[in-house]
Amino acid sequence: MLSTLRQQMITALADGQFHSGAHLADALGVSRAAIHNHIEALEQMGLDLYRVKGKGYRLAHPLSLLDGSALGAEQRDAPLHLFWQLDSTNAFLLERAKRCQNGEACLAEMQTGGRGRRGRTWVSPIASHLYLSYFWCLDQGLAAAGGLSLAVGVMLCEALESLGIQGLTLKWPNDLYLGGRKLAGILVEVSGQQGEACELIIGCGVNVTMPESVAAQIDQPWADLTSEWDTPDRNLLARTVLAHLDEGMRIFEQQGLSPFVERWQQRDQFANQPVKLLLGSQVLEGVARGIDPQGHLQLALPDGTVRRFAGGELSLRARD
Ligand code: BTN
């Protein structure tokens, strides 16, 4: 659990400078031994910390901590919830979905139960990445949400590109890649009854600065933003993503996926490449031919036919 004392320690250390144990103990009104124990706990949460005799403790990189005013929370039309720690930002908004407004959003410094697609865990170390969830209610119901996650992939790519990040691609349906490795993931969760308005929770996880201590836990090749952005500013990043979601969701609500299809194809990581498609226990080999107007993957099979695949248990791999 992230106690107030640990929050204060992270805030003190965020500048990336050395802070002696004695100074931290004095400033926070606890013993040096207590500081030492809390430092160990913070390391276990994923903070990369150095200790140098005679100088004290220092973070490997300065942290840009989330901050309501830097996020422009007051200027937003809908509430922006900001937490040090949550189980999952998606779970938070899902739980209050009936009371949410369009554009209501939630950010956390860390998640203890970050959710990925297909029941996976989304590793969510403290103050390192972006964990953001966003609410939208589609009055037209679930049928109108088809292709939404692909549209969100485009919105997220364009948000990052507007900050100068180059070389982003999309892996069907909605993973963001940088230099051929996964940079960000999107998990859209839906609540509501068939035939009624549907409540959408759009969860975005973006790797900003991957802590060394956490990298080993990630079971696939990953990228973070540090190769493209010297000192990433997570408040600017979150504000920019929110602005693109605000605009993109208004467009999606009126026009559906169509304004996003070409923009998705332009960034297709696997366009015209030989791929394998895992469909449950079945493996299909073919050549990826982008998406159709509904966002289905088009796969050219060895027999010359082109088959289309919707979401669900599909996954795509470059042929090895
Ligand atoms: C994926 O598996 O690619 C999707 C990952 C989505 C992670 C984000 S982080 C913010 C939001 N809250 C969650 O629990 N998951 C999403």
Image (tube, rainbow, N blue to C red):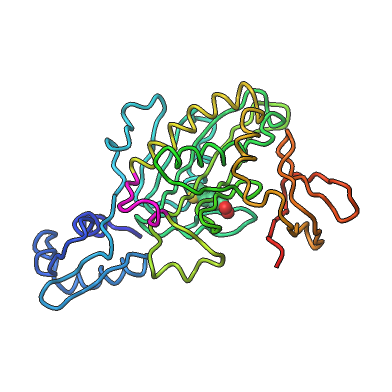
- 118 horizontally vs 306: left or right: left
* Residue 98 x, y percent position in the rendering: 54, 31
Q: Is residue 151 magenta?
A: no
Q: Residue at x 91, y 54 (%)?
A: 303
Q: State whether the magenta stretch is mostly helix, strand or loop.
A: loop
Residue, far right = 303
- 71 horizontally vs 178: left or right: left
* Residue 187 x, y percent position in the rendering: 58, 46
- 101 horizontally vs 169: left or right: left
- 70 horizontally vs 272: left or right: left
Locate the N terminus by quadrant: bottom left
Residue, far front = 272
User: Could you tell me how many numbered marks the image carries?
Assistant: 0
Locate the C terminus by quadrant: bottom right
Residue, far top = 254
**Along the viewing direction, whichever of 258 and 269 lies nearer the viewer:** 269
Q: Residue at x 61, y 46 (%)?
A: 174
Residue 114 sits above or below residue 255 on the image: below
* Residue 276 x, y percent position in the rendering: 75, 60
* Residue 136 x, y percent position in the rendering: 54, 30
Q: Residue at x 56, y 67 (%)?
A: 219
**Along the viewing direction, whichever of 261 and 57 lies nearer the viewer:** 261
The quarter of the displayed image where residue 241 is located: top left
Q: Which residues are magenta?
A: 225-234
